[in-house]
Image (cartoon, rainbow, N blue to C red):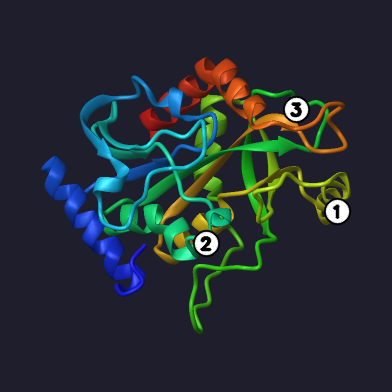
Amino acid sequence: MSDQTPPQTLAGEAAAALLQRFGLPSIDLALVLGSGWSGASEGLGEPIGECPLDELPGFAKPVVAGHGGALKLIRTPNGRAAALFTGRTHFYEGRGVAAVVHGVRTAAAAGAKAVVLTNGCGGLHAEWAPGTPVLIRDHINLTGATPLEGATFIDLTEAYSPRLRALAHDVDPTLAEGVYVQFRGPQYETPAEVRMAQVLGGDLVGMSTTLETIAAREAGLEVLGISLVTNPGAGISPTPLEHAEVIAAGAAAEPRLRGLLAGLLERL
């Protein structure tokens, strides 16, 4: 992320480069595919084109295993242009909040009206086995950061769109909902921190999504958040946590995740 160009300006430049590259007047929606989700993006619509993310202004190559590094443009079954970001910048990378939310700001500047934010996370309920997708109904941001500057007051009462969650339930009525708690990372949470998240009302713990949601709401985007439970939280799991679990859970859940995303894109 440039230290000289204001974040909103850089997002506009990235959006213009995106639209020019793919010959589109605008896009309609965007998906940010987190850990374990990239493989589920195959075959979701008619391909328009793709490029490495870092070829667009303000983007860098993803540094986390399990993330892709491409921006894919597809035409959904109902004719909408969708941008699929197969990777994201995490807050713990130290590149600043503006870099973390650059993708959603770029999507909004390119004309998107809705964004689907996905992640891999730790589950705080034993009944949510690895590979279980859970809708985010609310979040708790424990990063101590925000993408907003100055007196920018954004209502987050319905940060995660009830309308979009209802569409997701149409696709899969068995989907549970929960409160996502974002820690700074990159270390996994301690058992005591997991218990704290439970006391605060959390159901899921992870290292992404909440800052993007805040920026998306500032930009006027409807937000649908979906977590893939990749492992039980620390203290719930009988074994030490490893990132390899995240990748394996995503691979095992790929058919279900693809079906969920395909059903959503038929309705969005």
Q: Evaluate if marks 2 and 1 touch, with contact meaning CB atoms under 8 Å apart.
A: no
Residue drawn where x is 36% and y is 50% of the image:
60
Residue drawn where x is 40% and y is 62% of the image:
220
Q: Nearer the viewer, residue 64 or 234?
A: 64
| Picture quadrant of residue 252 | top right
Mark 1 to mark 3 CA distance (whole Å): 19 Å
Report helix, strand or loop for mark 2: helix
Q: Specify which label sits upstream in the sequence, 2 or 3.
A: 3
Neighbor class of circle 2 (other Cα within 10 Å; few <14, some 14-19, many 20+) is many
What residue is pinned by disc 3?
A: 128
Q: Nearer the viewer, residue 4 or 44?
A: 4
Left or right: residue 134 versus residue 190 is: left
Q: Evaluate if marks 1 and 3 touch, with contact meaning CB atoms under 8 Å apart.
A: no
Q: Give above or below for 231 relative to 209.
A: above
Neighbor class of circle 3 (other Cα within 10 Å; few <14, some 14-19, many 20+) is some
What residue is pinned by disc 2?
A: 214
In the rendered image, the quadrant that contains the N terminus is bottom left
Q: Specify which label sits upstream in the sequence, 2 or 1.
A: 1
Report helix, strand or loop for mark 3: loop
Q: Is residue 214 visible?
A: yes
Report helix, strand or loop for mark 1: helix
Q: Amino acid at mark 3?
A: Trp
Q: Is residue 263 visible?
A: no
Q: Specify which label sits upstream in the sequence, 1 or 3.
A: 3
User: Which disc is residue 256 wearing?
Assistant: none
Mark 2 to mark 1 CA distance (whole Å): 23 Å
Q: Amino acid at mark 1?
A: Met
What residue is pinned by disc 1?
A: 196
Q: Give above or below for 218 relative to 177.
A: below
Left or right: residue 51 versus residue 253 is: left
Q: Amino acid at mark 2?
A: Ile
Percent position (x, y) of residue 236? 86, 33
